[in-house]
Every structure is written in C-alpha cells, then in structure tokens.
Image (cartoon, rainbow, N blue to C red):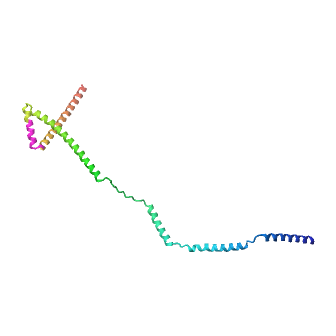
Amino acid sequence: MLQTMIDKIDQMNKMLQVLKEKIDSITDYSEDFKKLQGSQRETMMEVKSIPSQILIPVNDIVELKGEAIKLNEQLKEPLMQKVKHVHHLGKPVLGSIAFVSIILWLILRLWHEMDAVSRMKENDIKYRMLNLSFDNNLTKGIHLADSLFLDDPGKLSKEVQAEEKRRSELLNDIQRSLIKTEEKIKTIKHKH
C-alpha cells in the first residue's frame, strides 16, 4: 500500500511537472492586464469629470420654457384674419367703364326721345286732320283745347285725367248694373 501511494504521488508529480510545463508555455498577459486596468481607471476618471465640464444655462432654459408656454397659448387661440379688399382696376379701366356707361345711357335716351317724336308726329297728323274737318263744333273744341293747354298745361292735364277717371267709374257702374240685371232675368226665367 505504501508502494501504491508512492506510485500515486509519483504520478501526481509527473502530472504536476506536465502542468507546470504547460503553464510555463502559456504567455504571460499580466502586464497587459495591469496596463488595461490602468487605462480603464483613467477612462473612468475622464467620464466622471465630463458632467462637471458641461455648463447648463439654467436661465436660458427657463426663458425658453416661458416662451414655449406663451407660444402654446397663442396656438390654442384661433387666428383672426383681417380681410383687406384690394381692387386692381386702374383709372383707365374705370374711365372706360364710365365712358361706356354714359354712351349706353345716351343711346337709351335717344331711343326714348325718338319714340316720343314718333308718337308726336302721329298725334300731329291726327290733330291736323281733325282741324281740317268741316264740323264747326269739332274745330271749336280743338281750338278750346289748344288755348286751355297753352294757358296752363298742368291744369288741363289734371282735368283730363279726372274726367277719364270719372268716365271709367261710370262705365264700371254701368257694367255692374248690366250684370245684375242679367242675373235677375236669369233667375226670373228659371222660376217660370
């Protein structure tokens, strides 16, 4: 048993020897790790010092926040649009429109006057024909109408219109009485 133990210890020594050789053959990176560890510490120190290097303009931030709130309130209110009517017609165009309007008005006026002259010519011929008639009463009536018209045309016009109205009412009264008479006759005929 002792021998087995010795053999086992020898085997272990041999294994240790092989392991030691293997370990010795492994490249030693401990120096590199130390360098990395050092540079890592430096980087961490630099990173930790960055916030102290950053200047935060608190006053500017507060001012911008106030302006943002004001703008937000303004955007919530509907925009009142002022409408300004601008006419782009120049003086020559407006002058042309006025000139054409005056010409049209003059043409219409001329047409109206020509129509009136035509009616006057017709009435003149009729008047002259009646004046040439051989009926003395008719001729006297025409001369009387002429003299009344020459004295006061407005008065004669009013008298003529009043007489026309009176005769129109008289004619309407006669027509109504005729209609009533015809209705009475019809009712009497139906009774018999």
**Residue 80, position as x, y percentages in the image:** 39, 59
Residue located 44% across and 63% down the image: 74
Seen from the viewer's position, the closer of residues 124 and 73 is 124
**Residue 185, position as x, y percentages in the image:** 22, 28
Residue located 13% across and 34% down the image: 125
Vertical position of residue 149 compared to residue 181: above or below: below
Vertical position of residue 67 compared to residue 90: above or below: below
* Residue 17, quarter of the rendered image: bottom right
Quarter in which the C terminus is drawn: top left
Residue 151 counted in the magenta span: yes
Quarter in which the N terminus is drawn: bottom right
Q: Is residue 137 left or right of residue 119?
A: left
Provide the major secondary structure of the magenta segment. helix
Q: What stretch is highlighted in magenta?
A: 141-153
Seen from the viewer's position, the closer of residues 124 and 98 is 98
Residue located 17% across and 39% down the image: 117
* Residue 13, quarter of the rendered image: bottom right
Seen from the viewer's position, the closer of residues 8 and 84 is 8
Q: How many labels does the image show?
A: 0
**Residue 121, position as x, y percentages in the image:** 15, 37
Vertical position of residue 53 compared to residue 141: above or below: below
**Residue 38, position as x, y percentages in the image:** 67, 74
Residue located 22% across and 29% down the image: 182
Q: Is residue 21 left or right of residue 187?
A: right
Q: Is residue 103 left or right of residue 156?
A: right
* Residue 8, quarter of the rendered image: bottom right
